[in-house]
Image (tube, helix red, strand yellow):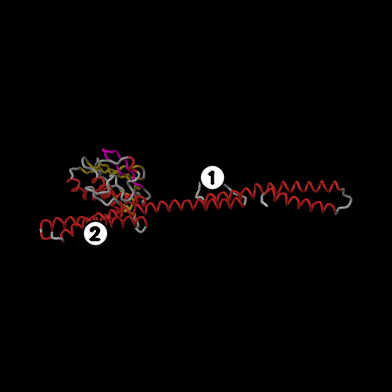
Amino acid sequence: MLLNSKAVAILLAILVGSITTAFLSLVSEISSQSLIVGGLISFSATYLLVFITFEFLVFKEISKIYEVMNKIRRKNFSFIEEAEDRKYINPLKRINKEIYSYAVGRQREIEELKKVEVFRREFLADVSHELKTPVFAAQGFVHTLLDGAIDDKKVRVKFLKRAARSLDSLDALIHDLLTLSQIELGETKMHFENFDIIETTKEVLEQFENKVEKKGLHIAFDQPYDHPVFVYADADKIYRVLTNLISNANKYTDVGQITIGFDISGDHVTTFVKDTGQGIPPENLARIFERFYRVEKSRAKGRKGGTGLGLAIVKHIMEAHNSKVSVISTVDKGSTFSFKLPLSKKEDIEAVEVDDLDELVED
């Protein structure tokens, strides 16, 4: 027998009608017609009440639960959005809500696992390629020397220098991988302090002056900055951000200049690094902060060099500062990278200046 709301209602109505008729028959001076009418009224009322209750409050909700379970089994989560912002009073509806919540959680876990799996495959492929290139290069130079080239002094020196450069590239790659991993895992602690970002930028510029001049480029501030601009951030990490951005600008700029500037607005300062390089195609802009992602289709580093992790490190450092790095770029005209930091409070700046004065007196 198929159990449904109509069948349950009929069974209960017959039972209640029979009990009602039997009870009325015990009462003296009641006619047979009255017993039949009483039994029918009891049957009808019970049937309607039970049918409506079971149909709309029980079986309907149970059917929905089965429907949800079947969709989950088929990995169809299209119903999730329908469950948003609903209030449930019926216990069965609450169960349905719990199933919805469970399905939402499972769907998110599945999506995250898929993303992690894709990322893991891509990361392993990228790391394998990036490690293989310098290792094979150094290995080739060393084996060539061992096979007899070591007897030629000129060849020996040239190959040893090339092997050293390959090993330096490998060391830089491993260092950047460790840095990125530590930042992502939260193992790198941020040491926030008040410091002059103008002075920090000048130190970075001094580091790149020779490299930029050798390429025939010009690097400078967009205007004279005679007064310090104090920000509240991790000085060492911001130094790394500036280093990576300027290095990236130098790497992809062959003609023109690299300009660094600051835009103070409200209680924040925006630092930008602008170049006149090759620019970035629109379809690549969304991915340039991914690990090992390069705009060039060829995976060979060629003359560009780098580990392919610089912009990824910049992104994570700025996220640790509750900020982000932005980029505007036009192909063959150049790119502008920028990031925003909070300005130091006046009282904090005065405290820094007092400390600096005390150090000068002690000296």
Residue 64 lies in the magenta-colored region: no
The three-letter amino acid code for the residue at tag 2 is Glu
Q: Residue at x 34, y 56 (%)?
A: 181
**Left or right of 35 in this view: 233:** left
Span shown in magenta: 324-337
Is 46 or 140 nearer to us in this picture? 140
Q: Is residue 64 visible?
A: yes
Q: Nearer the viewer, mark 1 or mark 2?
A: 1
Q: Main secondary structure of the magenta part?
A: strand
Q: Residue at x 32, y 46 (%)?
A: 288
* Element assignment for label 1: helix
Is 289 or 45 nearer to us in this picture? 45
**Tag shown at residue 362:** 2
Q: Is residue 354 visible?
A: no
**Outermost right residue:** 29
Quarter occupied by residue 138: bottom left
Residue 322 locus on image (x, y percent): 38, 50
Mark 1 vs 2, N-terminal side: 1
Residue 325 lies in the magenta-colored region: yes
